[in-house]
């Protein structure tokens, strides 16, 4: 069993020994703080007031005054503590509480044996109270404290003592102390307000610099104005911009639904119209008779001159007239807003110019691609047709020979290639111009797929398997034939002649599924969407079958007109699998 050291006292707990030090450190930290200078001064004088109040407690206890008076003085001390703490937190002047504070000080001054012992409390309390409030409020506070001092002296020493030199000397001294402290607090408050305005303008300027559109500029302007104006003014900010047909509310609160509505003309506040007409800031006000203090409703409007033309108006509704320095800061902020709007307009114009340049670049690239592809596509079949025709001319009577028939076949195949190329170009042009219409009729999609496979000459000699279940569906037969033919030609184009091709048609609950697959190299993931765009091709077309890149784009367009969809995925076992879903009931699609 552990025993305490001799002397009967145990070792003090470490936590308890550190508590006074921590309390002192916390008090010093609370006094020093990191807030504004005026806030720290209020904390300091509040502490001094409470300390002075505590120092009077012993004098009150040993006083020879009546017990009832001392008890009332004790109650007054509790009231003073609560009153000063409330004043520190809210910094508000309550006229109804001033007599109660004066009576509490009077009772305390009259309850101690020597009233002059309460002078320290009176001075420090007066310093604290003069750190907030206007000049008229400080006069009321000074009168209350003077009445408390003189009343306490008169009660304690008799009315004749009020004419004594020391008592009379305290009156101007207290007045001078109050005036000095109030002047210092007002000076510090103005300096702090100026610093706050500079910081608010700096933050607003940074936000306006970061804005890239007119909407962002308006939101940054509203936030900047609200931060710049004091909270008691309760500003409501609106930004109007010129839309070409007149001023319109771009951001902020609508003055038409405000509690105190300004004079409206043609749906706009009169101040906004005046600022837009004159090009100068306008300040209007009216007294609100519905309020007990009759504080005015103030409307401030400042035009936004963009390139020397009114491009908008910043409108602010206030509960009081702002100070001149605040109005000057608002003008500076509006100048920043004007510059930001100009930058936003330039940014939009520059972005539009970049988009136009990019479109021109893409158009030029598309034109070069089209010319290269079309020239190749036209030259190859034309060379074959021309060479075959010249040879046939030379053969003359031997036209029916085996060589002659082979030449005729080549001429026919290449002539059809030319016809298909021109047809694709014409169809793409008609689709872009909305000149293609669908003619629906019931069609057996399975039988149609078999027919297209049988008459596609590019598939002659190739291994093509058709697994087509009969599916009756209402489609435009000519367009769906083109869809199947283009998918087959695409499979033949990107695979070797020995590569097999599969065609499947199967019914779905909501339509039909058409699949064209091959065992070729497949489609890279990066191209699975791009190959369906006009003039886009896969990476490895064969040299003798290079095309323009219109086949798959026409597939997408024709299927979309039927309300279906097309996609490509990897085939199990290798290769590409192009899939088309056609709905049973076609929704009208844009032409």
Image (cartoon, rainbow, N blue to C red):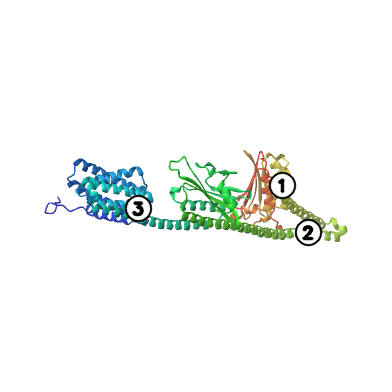
Res. 155 mark? none
Q: Nearer the viewer, mark 2 or mark 3?
A: 3
- Closer to the N terminus: mark 2 or mark 3? 3
Splitting the image into 4 quarters, where does residue 182 fall?
A: bottom left
Residue 538 appears at what percent x and percent y? 65, 56
Q: Viewer-proximal residue, 478 or 334?
A: 334
In-front residue for pair 164/372: 164
Q: Earlier in the sequence, mark 1 or mark 2?
A: 2
Which residue, given by chain and number where applicable, does mark 3 sit on?
131
Q: CA distance from mark 2 to mark 3?
A: 99 Å
Neighbour tally class for label 3: few under 14, some 14-19, many 20 plus, Cα within 10 Å: many
Q: CA distance from mark 1 to mark 3?
A: 78 Å
Q: Are marks 2 and 3 in contact (CB under 8 Å)?
A: no
Distance between the Cα atoms at labels 1 and 2?
31 Å
Query: Of the residues tagged 1 and 2, which is closer to the observer?
Result: 1
* Numbered mark located on residue 434 in the image: 1
Mark 1: few, some, or many residues within 10 Å (few <14, many ≥20)? Answer: few
For the C terminus, the quadrant is: top right
In the displayed structure, would residue 176 be above or below residue 445?
A: below
The residue pinned by badge 2 equals 382
* Mark earlier in primary sequence (1, 3): 3
Secondary structure category for the residue under label 3: loop
Q: Could you say which is closer to the camera, residue 373 or residue 241?
A: 241
């Amino acid at each position: 069993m552990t025993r305490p050291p001799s002397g009967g006292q145990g070792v003090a707990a470490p936590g308890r020994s550190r508590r006074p030090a921590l309390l002192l450190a916390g008090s010093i930290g609370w006094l020093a703080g990191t807030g504004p200078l005026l806030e720290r001064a209020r904390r300091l004088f509040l502490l001094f007031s409470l300390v002075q109040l505590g120092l009077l407690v012993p004098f009150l206890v040993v006083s020879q005054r009546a017990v009832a008076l001392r008890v009332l003085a004790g109650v007054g001390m509790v009231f003073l503590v609560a009153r000063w703490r409330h004043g520190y937190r809210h910094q508000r002047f309550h006229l109804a509480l001033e007599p109660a504070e004066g009576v509490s000080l009077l009772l305390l001054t009259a309850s101690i044996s020597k009233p002059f012992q309460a002078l320290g409390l009176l001075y420090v309390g007066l310093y604290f109270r003069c750190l907030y409030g206007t000049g008229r409020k400080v006069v009321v506070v000074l009168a209350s404290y003077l009445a408390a001092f003189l009343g306490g002296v008169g009660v304690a020493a008799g009315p004749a003592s009020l004419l004594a030199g020391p008592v009379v000397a305290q009156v101007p001294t207290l007045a001078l102390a109050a005036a000095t402290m109030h002047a210092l607090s007002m000076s510090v408050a103005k300096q702090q307000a100026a610093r706050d305005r500079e910081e608010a303008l700096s933050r607003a300027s940074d936000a306006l610099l970061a804005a890239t559109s007119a909407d962002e500029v308006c939101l940054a302007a509203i936030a900047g104005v609200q931060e710049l104006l004091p909270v008691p003014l309760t500003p409501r900010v609106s930004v109007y911009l010129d839309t070409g047909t007149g001023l319109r509310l771009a951001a902020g609160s609508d003055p038409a639904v405000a509690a105190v509505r300004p004079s409206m003309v043609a749906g706009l506040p009169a101040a906004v119209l005046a600022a837009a007409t004159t090009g100068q800031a306008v300040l209007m006000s009216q007294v609100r008779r519905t309020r007990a203090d009759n504080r005015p409703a103030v409307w401030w409007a400042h035009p936004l001159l963009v390139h020397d033309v009114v491009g908008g108006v910043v409108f602010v509704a206030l509960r009081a007239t702002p100070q001149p320095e605040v109005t000057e800061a608002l003008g500076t902020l509006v100048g920043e807003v004007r510059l930001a709007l100009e930058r936003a307009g330039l940014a939009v114009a520059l972005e539009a110019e970049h988009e136009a340049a990019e479109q021109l670049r893409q158009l030029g690239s598309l034109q070069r691609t089209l010319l290269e592809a079309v020239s190749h596509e036209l030259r190859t079949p034309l060379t074959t047709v021309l060479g075959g025709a010249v040879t046939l001319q030379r053969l003359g009577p031997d036209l029916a020979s085996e060589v002659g028939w082979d030449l005729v076949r080549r001429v026919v195949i290449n002539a059809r290639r030319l016809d298909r190329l021109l047809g694709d170009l014409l169809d793409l042009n008609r689709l872009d111009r909305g000149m293609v219409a669908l003619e629906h009729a019931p069609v057996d999609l399975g039988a149609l797929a078999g027919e297209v496979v049988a008459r596609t000459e590019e598939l002659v000699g190739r291994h093509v398997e058709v697994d087509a279940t009969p599916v009756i569906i209402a489609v435009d037969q000519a367009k769906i034939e083109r869809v199947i033919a283009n998918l087959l030609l695409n499979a033949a184009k990107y695979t070797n002649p020995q590569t097999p091709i599969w065609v499947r048609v199967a019914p779905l609950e909501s339509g039909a599924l058409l699949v064209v697959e091959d065992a070729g190299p497949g489609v890279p993931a990066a191209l699975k969407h791009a190959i369906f765009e006009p003039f886009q091709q896969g990476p490895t077309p064969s040299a003798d079958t290079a095309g323009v890149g219109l086949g798959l784009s026409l597939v997408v367009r024709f299927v979309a007109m039927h309300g279906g969809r097309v996609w490509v995925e990897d085939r199990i076992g290798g290769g590409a699998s192009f899939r088309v879903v056609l709905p049973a009931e076609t929704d009208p699609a844009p032409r």
